Image (cartoon, rainbow, N blue to C red):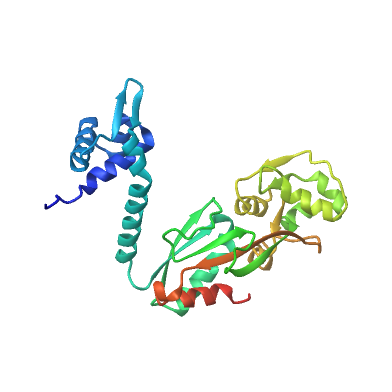
Amino acid sequence: MVHQPLPLNAVHAFLVTTRHLNLTRAADELCLTQGAVSRKIAALEKWLGFTLFDRHARGLHLTTRGAAMLPQLKQGYELMLSATEQARQPDNALRLRAPSCAMRWLLPKLVQLEQQHPGLHVKLTTTLAHNYQLENFDAAIVYGIAPVGSHLLFEERLTPVMAENLLVNRPLDVASLASFTFLHPTNDERDWQLWLQAQEVELPMRRNQHFATMDLAIGAAIQGFGVTVADITLVKSDLAAQRLIAPFASAVKTGAAYSLISREEKATSPHLATLVAWLCQPD
């Protein structure tokens, strides 16, 4: 018996619909009419020989067989997309994911890498999430506890930084920080609390601004908005260019680090070893 080819467009429509359990919203995501989505699902149901959804007044529900099939079908579809996306990449293109907070450290290194190795290209994706999985990337920078088998890039060490013009006619000691606006890299204010605890000092924080990432807090400090705590490695170039000053010698380790995970070189681009070695070399 000869089977008809699996209708991949119908599989895609089915997977999108399972996320919404609503034909109208699925149609909006697919840029199709509701009727077109229904026809694609019907085509897949015909190919499979069983119903995928029960229709109710409030929306759709997966049938027992549809729900049982979904995890493996979704995994297989994502693997297919990953394989084809990887095959489409030029041999010299490496896919690197990195948290946005690491950009101040990473971007200059990537510029220098491509200048030294013009045949190598890094396709960079930034993220706010801290994901320890490679997914479809060749390499990824991760923040937190260094995963087993990863390459340590640098440990996080925090110290206050600010624009130099904020110190005009102001005393320079820990207690004087209370007169500034505190710029917090996180909503929980944990980074500032860690540094102050290491100084065995409690300060009133009368004026506060909170940011989604350390990079945004650093940018605000450069503009003279206030004082933030920042990783000394991430602000190294800003300190050298005098965009920021670090008025205190004390830096506190948070227990977190920036690490690099990567695929096995033999399974991906031959340039991957070059990228790993470049990022891991000491500053």
| Residue 78, percent from left and from top | 35, 53
Can the viewer see residue 58? yes
- In this view, the residue farthest toward the top is 57
| Residue 131, percent from left and from top | 53, 54
Can the viewer see residue 17? no
- In this view, the residue farthest toward the bottom is 116
- Numbered circles on residues, count: 0
Q: Quadrant of residue 66?
A: top left
Q: Is residue 112 left or right of residue 51?
A: right
The residue closer to the viewer here, 173 or 11, is 11
- In this view, the residue farthest toward the left is 1
Q: Quadrant of residue 105?
A: bottom right
Could you tell me which residue is drawn at 23 percent across and 43 percent down?
A: 10
* Quadrant of the snapshot with the C terminus: bottom right
Location of residue 61 with respect to 90 vertically, above or below: above
Q: Is residue 46 left or right of residue 156?
A: left
The residue closer to the viewer here, 152 or 60, is 60
Could you tell me which residue is drawn at 33 percent across and 60 percent down?
A: 85
Could you tell me which residue is drawn at 83 percent across and 41 percent down?
A: 204
The residue closer to the viewer here, 165 or 161, is 161
| Residue 278, percent from left and from top | 53, 76
| Residue 83, percent from left and from top | 33, 61
